[in-house]
């Protein structure tokens, strides 16, 4: 293997990238655009739920119960209703997500320590949001119920009136439960797939379309030298894109890396090795940039978004789909990223993921070189 031939291919590719300013700008600016979109528009946090209340009891106790929903950022009072006919109208047009109905006798039942029923009518169009809203309602109702029971026991002079459970949850790794901390690692994987796989595949296919691939094949350059020279620029662009996302997420959303930056860089390099190898493999299966682009989208971007644990948890998937995720490199890279960034874990925690990424990179790179050799023969 000749270093001079690799350098010649590398210089040629760098010049090509520098001339294609539109593609270069897309590779460097698009990650920032995706970060802003995912950080602000595609938040998984459910807050400021639009709430309507119908209080048939109209007592100090019922008003105190309803006030508990308004003392947090999770509920915003949108309407105070006069009859139940208004509930369907508000839910139909999306004005509110939850409507609470407090029946007559609520305060008296709560004061006596009995069963005080409250109805919550929820818009279930979005199942995830509806389930979260129901959970919030249940938490507020349980807290109010406990306080009411303690007051009833005190009035009755019960000796265990003060022996209540003091529930204090402790959330590790992401105490504020911010979705940005959860989404940024997945976004890094998405950006690397885009900048490495897609760019590498399109670069080699572009040589086929222009008829220059035949010149490279008949030149003294070997397939391995050609691959190395072609992929290094996009390997570096991928590293720059990942660093850009990390820096911007720190400035915009306060996302920090709890673990070692060296570990983060090492895992990213191994993942990029597999990405550029897969990009070369896709280029050997495509005769046009359009075909290469479609294959890149369906075999890389969509699997990373859907099957890597980026947004959808594995436990909610059917078993056959869960089995498919084990051949997706994004699954292992994302698990390693979250271990490093959120938990500050070392290689003892993500070692198996790193090994899986290394095996994947060796396999796809070997296949791509074999395919190039066959095409050159």
Image: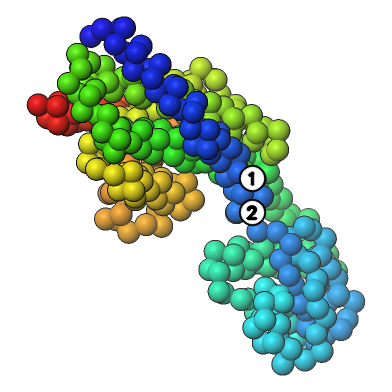
Vertical order, 239 against 124 (above or below): above
- Depth check, front residue: 333 or 121: 333
Q: Does the rendering let one see residue 13?
A: yes
Q: Does the rendering let one see residue 158?
A: no
State the SS at label 2: helix
Residues under numbered marks 1 and 2 in contact, where contact means CB atoms less than 8 Å apart:
yes
Q: Position of residue 303 (x, y in %)?
A: 37, 48
Tell me the residue that label 2 is attached to.
41
The mark that comes first in sequence, 1 or 2, is: 1
| 171 with respect to 150 (left or right) | left
Q: Where is residue 283 in the image (x, y as percent from the top left)?
A: 27, 37
- Depth check, front residue: 197 or 76: 197
Vertical order, 153 against 85 (above or below): above
Vertical order, 134 against 27 (above or below): below
State the SS at label 1: helix
Q: Position of residue 91 (x, y in %)?
A: 66, 81
Name the colour scheme: rainbow
Spatial distance from mark 1 to mark 2, Cα to Cα?
8 Å
- The image shows a total of numbered marks equal to 2
Label 1 CA crowd tier, 10 Å (few <14, some 14–19, many 20+): some
Residue plotted at (53% across, 33% down):
21
Name the image quarter holding the C terminus.
top left
Q: Residue 36, labelled with which disc? A: 1
Residue plotted at (49% across, 51% down):
311
């Amino acid at each position: 293997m000749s270093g001079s031939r690799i350098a010649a291919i590398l210089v040629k590719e760098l010049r090509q990238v520098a001339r294609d300013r539109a593609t270069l700008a897309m590779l460097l600016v698009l990650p920032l655009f995706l970060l802003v979109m995912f950080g602000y528009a595609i938040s998984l946090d459910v807050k400021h739920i639009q709430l309507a209340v119908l209080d048939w009891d109209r007592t100090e106790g019922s008003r105190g119960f309803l006030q508990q929903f308004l003392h947090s950022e999770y509920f915003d009072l949108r309407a105070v209703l006069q009859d139940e006919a208004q509930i369907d109208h508000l839910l139909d047009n999306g004005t509110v997500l939850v409507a609470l109905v407090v029946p007559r006798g609520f305060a008296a039942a709560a004061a006596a320590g009995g069963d005080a029923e409250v109805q919550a009518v929820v818009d279930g169009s979005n199942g995830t949001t509806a389930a979260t809203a129901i959970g919030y309602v249940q938490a507020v109702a349980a807290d109010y119920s406990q306080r009411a029971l303690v007051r009833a026991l005190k009035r009755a002079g019960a000796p265990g009136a003060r022996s209540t459970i003091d529930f204090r949850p402790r959330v590790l790794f992401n105490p504020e439960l911010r979705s940005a901390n959860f989404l940024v690692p997945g976004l890094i994987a998405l950006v690397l797939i885009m900048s490495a796989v897609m760019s590498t595949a399109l670069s080699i296919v572009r040589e086929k379309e222009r008829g220059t691939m035949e010149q490279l094949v008949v030149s003294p350059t070997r397939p391995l030298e050609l691959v190395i020279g072609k992929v290094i620029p996009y390997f570096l662009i991928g590293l720059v894109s990942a660093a850009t996302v990390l820096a911007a997420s720190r400035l915009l959303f306060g996302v920090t890396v709890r673990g070692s930056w060296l570990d983060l860089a090492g895992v990213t390099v191994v993942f990029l090795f597999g990405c550029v190898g897969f990009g070369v493999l896709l280029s050997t299966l495509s005769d046009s940039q359009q075909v290469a682009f479609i294959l890149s989208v369906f075999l890389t971007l969509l699997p990373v978004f859907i099957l890597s644990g980026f947004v959808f948890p594995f436990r909610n998937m059917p078993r056959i789909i869960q089995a498919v995720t084990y051949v997706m490199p994004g699954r292992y890279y994302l698990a390693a990223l979250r271990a490093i960034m959120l938990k500050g874990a070392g290689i003892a925690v993500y070692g198996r993921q790193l090994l899986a990424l290394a095996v994947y990179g060796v396999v796809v790179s070997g296949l791509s070189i074999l395919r190039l050799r066959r095409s050159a023969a």
